[in-house]
Image: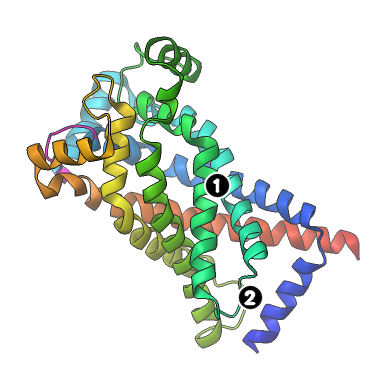
Amino acid sequence: MATSHLKSQNSTTSKLSNTDIVLTSLCAGAIAGALAKTTIAPLDRTKINFQISQQPYSAKRAVQFIKETYRKEGFLALWRGNSATMARIIPYAAIQFTAHEQWKRILKVDSTGKSPGKQFLAGSLAGMTSQSLTYPLDLARARMAVTHKDEYATLRQVFLKIYREEGLLTFYRGYIPTIMGVIPYAGVSFFTYETLKRWYREHVDNSPTPHPIVSLGFGAIAGMLGQSSSYPLDIVRRRMQTDTNKTYLSILGTLKTIHKHENIYGFYKGLSSNWLKNPLAVGVSFVTYDYLKRLIIEKKYQQGT
């Protein structure tokens, strides 16, 4: 029965042209990414501030940071840098979900789970594709998140100031550790989510798409596993991205400096808060994408019949 439902869903999708599939993925991915990131923006800003400092992380300090930010800069300051986040995450998520669909098609990933290696690779390549195309926006977002609004008032100012004072290559500072981290992160996230959905379809409920709450849970698990697999490299890239004093100029140098001053714990600073933030973001993103994709495909199919 599960197989027949899956075949029916795949049959509907297969009647769409590849252009329709791309446009559907772009639209659903963009909205999914924007909604997910806006939901966790205050937690994201808190995480970045601890990642780039040598101050030990604790839940108490995180709450204190949020309170001080609210008191000194106002409620909306908790979303400072979110405009840069939106400028990045909308194309990033749109490209990532679209690239994932296309890489699955190119690699001929089997929908029954008989090609787990290809499934993992499709997720990794999707992450690499989207990260490479939107990396300067990620760097700009990080700079805005860790500075006062007097230094970088707008996204445009971030780009102009970095270009004038630090040079063009600065926009890709931290790129290598980012890509090294996104390979396991995106691979594990997509692989885990797709695997859990398939298992649920085969053993619990044979409907093509699980209930949104179930999908949210699967997305959260995928996000937690993906984040844990790549978190130390996330620390390294944030230090390199936000470093204006040229302390963190290379991956090896950054690793040594963090270990020297903060020990092994420095590589996992803020991970506990990320286990709240990232699973929520990934879960919301996957659920929203699946829902919108199915909705758009069904409407297109109905219009074509």
Q: What colouring style does the render use?
A: rainbow
**The stretch drawn in magenta includes residue 265:** no
Nearest to viewer (mark 2 / mark 1): 1
The local secondary structure at tag 2 comes to: loop
Return the x and y of residue 44 as percentages of the image width and height: 34, 39
Whether label 2 touches label 1, CB < 8 Å: no
Quarter of the image where one finds residue 90: top right
Label located before the other in sequence (2 or 1)? 1
Return the x and y of residue 229 as percentages of the image width and height: 31, 58
Instruction: Answer whether residue 86 is visible to the viewer in this image.
Output: yes
The local secondary structure at tag 1 comes to: helix
What kind of residue is marked 2? Pro
Question: Could you classify mark 2 by the number of other residues whose Cα lies within 10 Å: few (under 14), some (14-19), or many (20 or more)?
Answer: some
Up the image or down, 292 lies above or below 250; here it is: below
Outermost residue, bottom side: 1
Quarter of the image where one finds residue 262: top left
Give the residues drawn in magenta, as a range: 52-59
Up the image or down, 44 lies above or below 32; here it is: above
What kind of residue is marked 1? Thr
For residue 208, which numbered disc appears in the image?
2
Q: Nearer the viewer, residue 296 or 243?
A: 243
Q: How many marks?
A: 2
Residue for point 39% across, 15% down: 152
Outermost residue, right side: 305
**The stretch drawn in magenta includes residue 56:** yes
Read off the residue under disc 1. 129
Q: Is residue 224 left or right of residue 129?
A: left
Return the x and y of residue 288 as percentages of the image width and height: 56, 55
Residue for point 15% across, 42% down: 57
